[in-house]
Image: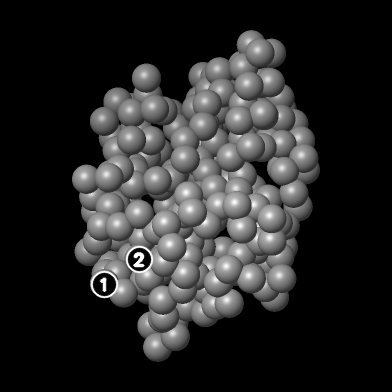
Amino acid sequence: MLGERVWPEVGEGVTVLVPVGSVEQHGPHLPLDTDTRIAEAVARGAAARARAQAGADVLVAPAVAFGASGEHEGFAGTVSIGTDAVRTVLVELGRSAGRWARRLVFVNGHGGNVDALRGAVALLRAEGRDVRWYGCAPPPDVTPVRDAHAGRVETSLMLALAPDTVRLDLVEAGNTTPLPELMPALRAHGVAPVAENGVLGDPAGASASEGEAMLAAMVDQLCRLTLT
Ligand SMILES: [Zn+2]
C-alpha cells in the first residue's frame, strides 16, 4: 500500500494502481461504498500477484472514493462529485504521481466514472505518461448473469469480500429489464423512477463462491494489464 510506505521506500520505476469508486446507493442490502471496496480488492489482489509472479514493484494508492453518480441522486447516502470533477482529480493525480511513478493504472469500480476515466487517461497519455485504466467487470465465462447494479454480480462480490456488510434479510429483486432497454429512461430521469429500491437486476442466487471466482478472474485481467 502506497500510504504505508515512507518516501525512500518508493523507488522510481514503481507502478501505482489507483482504485476509483463511488459513494452511491446499492439497493437496500449493499453498502454505499460497494464500488470502492470492489476496486480496492481487485487492485490489491493484482498488486500482490504482480509482485509474486514477476517481482514487480506495484503499489496500491488510497482510493478516489467519490465518483460521478448523478443517476443515483435521489437516494439518501449518495454523494456524487460529477464527471468534470472526477476527470480533473484523475488528471492532476496522474500528473503528480507521474513525477516518480513509471506507470499508473486506474482501477474503476463504477460504470458512471467511465466518461471521466476515458477523458483523463486520453489527456495524460497525450502528455506522454504511461497511464491506463481497467474497468472491474468479470469476464462472461465466470459471470452468472449480466446485471447492472446491486444485482447478483455485485452481491456475490460483496459476499466474498465483506459478508458482514451484506444485509441478507433485505435482499430483493429490482428492475430486471435489460440495461440497453432501460438506458434512455435512466439517462433522462436517473435510477429512482425506474427502480424504487435502487436495484437493477436480481440478487437471487448470489454466493461468496461465485464472488471469489469473479474476483480471481478480474485480478488475473488486471495483473496482465499491469505487467504488459
Ligand atoms: Zn456498484
User: Dot 1, crowdedness within 10 Å: few (<14), some or many (≥20)?
Assistant: few
Q: Would residue 59 be found to the left or right of residue 125 on screen?
A: left
Q: Position of residue 192 (x, y in %)?
A: 63, 70
Give the colour scheme of this rendering.
one colour
List x then y, in percent, for residue 122. 63, 21
Residue at 23% x, 50% y is 142
Residue 152 position within the rendered picture, expressed as x and y whole percent measured from the top left: 35, 65
Front residue of 39/151: it is 151
Side (left or right) of 22 relative to 158: right
Identified at 22% across, 64% down, the residue is 209
Residue 157: give x, y in percent of width and height. 36, 61
**Residue 50 picture quarter:** top left
Q: What's the mark number on residue 191?
A: none
Nearer-the-camera pick, 102 or 79: 79
Q: Which residue is mark 1?
A: 205
In this view of the protein, which residue sits in the foreground, 159 or 135? Answer: 135
Residue 141 higher or lower than 146, as above or below: above
Residue 145 visible? The answer is yes
CB of mark 2 within 8 Å of CB of mark 1? yes
Q: Nearer the viewer, residue 82 or 209?
A: 82
Q: Quadrant of the C terminus?
A: top left
Apparent side of residue 188 relative to residue 183 in the rendered image (left or right) = right
Relative height, residue 191 to residue 42 (above, below): below
| Badge 1 element | loop
Residue shown at 29% from the left, 38% from the top: 220
- Amino acid marked by disc 1: Gly
Q: Which residue is mark 2?
A: 152
* For residue 114, above or below residue 55: below
**What is the CA distance from the residue labelled 2 to the residue labelled 1?**
7 Å
